[in-house]
Image: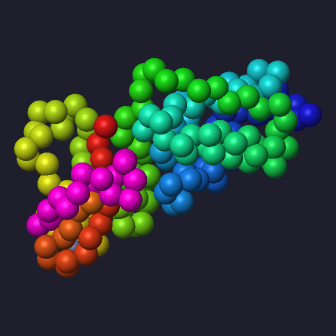
């Protein structure tokens, strides 16, 4: 058993940066904003909030978190799921947004509150060439969390990670 007295939540958070989202393998659960709280008492409690509700990936994430921490020598880890407040794309970190773009998925534009005000203005820049000359092809891309767009300049189709 690890002496939890010497562990800081930041240390755990850094370890969790190696746990990737099952759907987007370049994005860690930390960058995803899924990790809400880390409590170090006589054991470790990691609180997570699922992303898109009903995402089957969540069970995998819970298992992956436990497995990762166990491999690092942390035993008796508890993963708690909290549904409120609901996850929003605002919780994605800056780094996470860059990772998404590098992976070819347009990150969510702006914050959800801004989006409500400027819904019609929403343009999704192409992650390949940054052109704003893009069109929505389908509300649903490879998964329900993404919409499919096409760039009219470089003609590449791409996924847009929807704002919620
Ligand atoms: Zn393009």
Residue 130 lies, in percent from the top left, at 21, 68
Residue 5 position by quadrant: top right
Residue 133 lies, in percent from the top left, at 11, 67
Image point (16%, 33%), residue name: 116
Q: Is residue 39 left or right of residue 43?
A: left
Q: Quadrant of ligand 1?
A: bottom left
Residue 158 lies, in percent from the top left, at 29, 66
Image point (81%, 49%), residue name: 71
Image point (63%, 50%), residue name: 19
Q: Quadrant of the C terminus?
A: top left
Q: Is residue 53 left or right of residue 146?
A: right
Decide which of 22, 48 is in the foreground and name it.
22
Residue 90 position by quadrant: top left
Q: Which residues are the magenta region? A: 133-147
162 in relation to 134, above or below:
above
Q: Can you name the residue that lies furthest to the bottom here?
A: 154
Residue 20 lies, in percent from the top left, at 58, 53
Is residue 145 covered in magenta?
A: yes
Residue 106 visible at all = no
Image point (62%, 40%), residue name: 59
């Amino acid at each position: 058993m690890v002496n939890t007295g010497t562990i800081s939540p930041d240390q755990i958070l850094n370890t969790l940066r190696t746990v990737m989202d099952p759907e987007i393998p370049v994005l860690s659960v930390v960058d995803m904003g899924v990790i809400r709280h880390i409590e170090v008492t006589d054991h470790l409690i990691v609180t997570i909030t699922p992303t898109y509700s009903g995402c089957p990936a969540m069970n995998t994430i819970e298992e992956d978190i436990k497995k990762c921490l166990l491999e690092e020598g942390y035993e008796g880890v508890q993963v708690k799921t909290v549904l409120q407040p609901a996850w929003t794309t605002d919780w994605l970190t800056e780094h996470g947004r860059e990772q998404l773009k590098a992976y070819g998925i347009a990150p969510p534009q702006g914050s959800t509150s801004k989006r409500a005000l400027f819904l019609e203005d929403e343009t999704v820049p192409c992650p390949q060439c940054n052109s704003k000359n893009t069109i929505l092809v389908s509300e649903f891309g490879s998964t329900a969390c993404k919409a499919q767009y096409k760039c009219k300049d470089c003609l590449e189709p791409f996924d847009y990670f929807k704002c919620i």
